[in-house]
Amino acid sequence: MDTPTGKPLDQRKVLIVGIANEHSIAYGCARAFRELGAELAITYLNDKAKAYVEPLAQELGASLLLPLDVSKPGQLEAAFDAIRATWGRLDVAVHSIAFAPKEDLQGGLLNSSPEGFSIAMDISCHSFIRMARLAAPLMDDGGALFAMSYLGASRVVPNYDLMGPVKAALEASCRYLAHELGPKRIRVHPISPGPLKTRAASGLKDFDLLLNEAAERAPIGELVDIMDVGYTCAFLSTPYARRMTGNTIFVDGGVSIIG
């Protein structure tokens, strides 16, 4: 039996999808949830990624370390089967994965290929819907689902290109899922961090310029970090945020309020 520690998320079971290394937004989320008392299930993309993720999972005392490539049929279902067998329930799931082929990501929206657009939409958006479908039956006492978006979903951000429409679809999906899952007391949050130096973001053209511009425009005068995102998700998973769902939450130092 778990021993309560008096922390806000004691005994909560949390799935974290998307850790690639210690710079990942998902890692910041994992650290924040663990700090607040949650138990963790952490996934890794493949054997190469496992070498980087496994030490982080051990550091955090994760109960489960599971392979998960959402592009491979059956892997998402297998991960949830393992969660069901180990915990019997789930309280929170964090989806922090996105992908587009480099040639489509850097070639402008006008020149994106049907295949590249489809891949980006499936991995970055529809996999969250599939995750929600599998998570919901394990959330008998309610729960929270998180997906990572970006300002480019609602405004034109130079060089974000293909991922803008994809993230817009992700945010819309979160709103519709919040509506569908609300009666089950499952809350759904699209989180929109400011630009962060992650491996995924490094694939964007002129990303360093984007970082510098964000730091200059932010009312607080500095960039956010992965722990800022993690603490926001952790807070939204507590009873203190029990009436919040469906709205995009910006964690960007105020950049999104600047025209």
Image (spheres, rainbow, N blue to C red):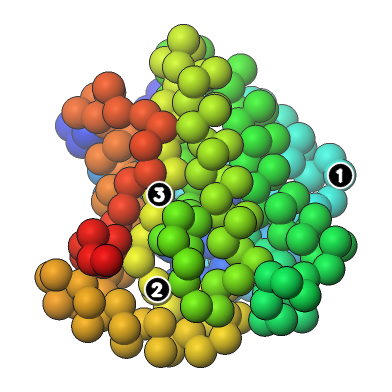
Counting residues from the start of the chain, the first of labels 3 and 2 encountered is 3
Q: Nearer the viewer, residue 200 or 117?
A: 117
Q: Residue at x 39, y 72 (%)?
A: 195
Q: Residue at x 37, y 60 (%)?
A: 193
Q: Are marks 3 and 2 in contact (CB under 8 Å)?
A: no
- The x, y position of residue 158, in whole percent, is 50, 78
Counting residues from the start of the chain, the first of labels 1 and 2 encountered is 1
Q: Amino acid at mark 3?
A: Ile
- The x, y position of residue 102, in whole percent, is 73, 79
Element carrying mark 2: loop
Q: Residue at x 71, y 81 (%)?
A: 107
Judged left or right of residue 76, residue 94 is left
Total numbered badges shown on the rendered structure: 3
- Asked if residue 102 can be seen in this view, the reply is no
Q: Nearer the viewer, residue 29 or 59?
A: 29
Q: Are marks 1 and 2 in contact (CB under 8 Å)?
A: no
Q: Amino acid at mark 2?
A: Leu
Pointer 1: what residue? 73
Element carrying mark 1: loop
Q: Which mark is residue 191?
A: 3
